[in-house]
Image: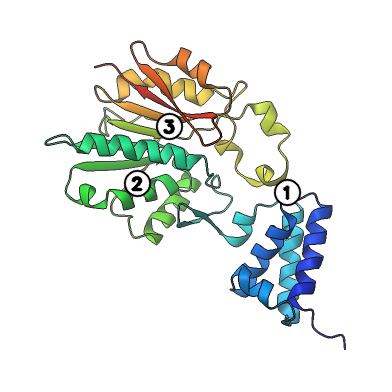
Amino acid sequence: MAPPEAVGQALASAAGRLRQAQSPSPRLDAEVLLAHLLDRDRSWLLAHPEAPMSEADGGSYRALVDRRAAGEPVAYLRGFKEWRSLRIRTDARALIPRPETELLLEAAIEEIEARLARPDASVVGWEVATGSGAVAVALALRFASQIRDGRLRLVASDVSVDALGLAAENLAGHGVNDLVELIEADLLEPAAGAMPAPDVVVANLPYVPSDEVDVRQGSLGFEPRIALDGGPDGLVLLRRLLESLPSRVAPSASAFLELGIGQVVAVQELAPAGASVSVVPDLAGLDRVVRIAMAD
């Protein structure tokens, strides 16, 4: 009988398999997946390369590595993504939270804080296209006391029922499901009608041009098209949202949008009459988030 495979051997074999498959981070992926499978941290793996693995664990690990080699995202294989120190549940129902979306969140937090600092302030915040609910979870945790005091009302919407299901699971998993109103909606359609007109809008809408989505490879091939495809020019949904702002938002409202690289000029041209547009660059100096400040 062959001796059981050791941790170090399994990692080396997996990293080689992923390198051949042109994974962008083969060794890291191999370590993260094995640590997840064995319920250990990566430092333990590196400190115990001689530790034997059971035959069952070895088979399960090879299956995970094969799926990663085929391009399936690590976040889907583990079932979660660590994002802003939060463990966000992830699967094919919604886009995996990206680091750049943290910039969108921070901009929204600053805006909500500034509005709540005003005497007798009452603020409605609305996240459009909530997806996994990561942004809604973070906002609810940050402003839990203000929501409970009735000074902030937080709404999160999506057109995808599947995505809303995942968002509900993440809100419940972080204990804030009672602080966010989840609704199925096409952009801000119910606003200023059945739902309140928002003071702060946060949106990470699909902005990838359709032809780029058609040839997507690797991890992008496993994420839902509805969360990526922004139409022929990548601006279809952004254009619709911007057109709707004057009739859907409260006076002097602000909207924060995450964009694709090179889309700022187009969004500036599409902004409602009288609105001002300012850019929030990311750490690499790229224009990824804009603030649309509506005129009074």
Which residue position is annotated with label 1?
Answer: 24
What residue sits 71% from the left and 76% below the top? 57
What residue sits 47% from the left and 12% below the top? 269
Q: Position of residue 25 (x, y in %)?
A: 71, 53
Could you tell me the amino acid type at mark 2? Leu
Could you say whether the residue bearing mark 3 is in a helix, strand or loop?
Answer: loop
Which residue position is annotated with label 2?
Answer: 139
Is 193 situated left or right of 266 in this image? left
Q: CA distance from mark 3 to mark 2?
A: 21 Å
Q: What crowding class fits label 1: few (fewer than 14 Cα within 10 Å), some (14-19), or many (20 or more)?
A: few
Q: CA distance from mark 3 to mark 1?
A: 36 Å
Q: In this rendering, does residue 3 appear at all? A: yes
Which label's residue is closer to the chain start, 3 or 2?
2
Is 260 situated left or right of 110 in this image? right
Which label's residue is closer to the chain start, 2 or 1?
1
Could you tell me the amino acid type at mark 3? Asp
Front-most of residues 61 and 99: 99
Q: Position of residue 210 (x, y in %)?
A: 65, 27
Which label's residue is closer to the chain start, 3 or 1?
1
Q: Check the image and report above or below for 55 versus 154.
A: below
Which residue position is annotated with label 3?
Answer: 186
Could you tell me the amino acid type at mark 1? Pro
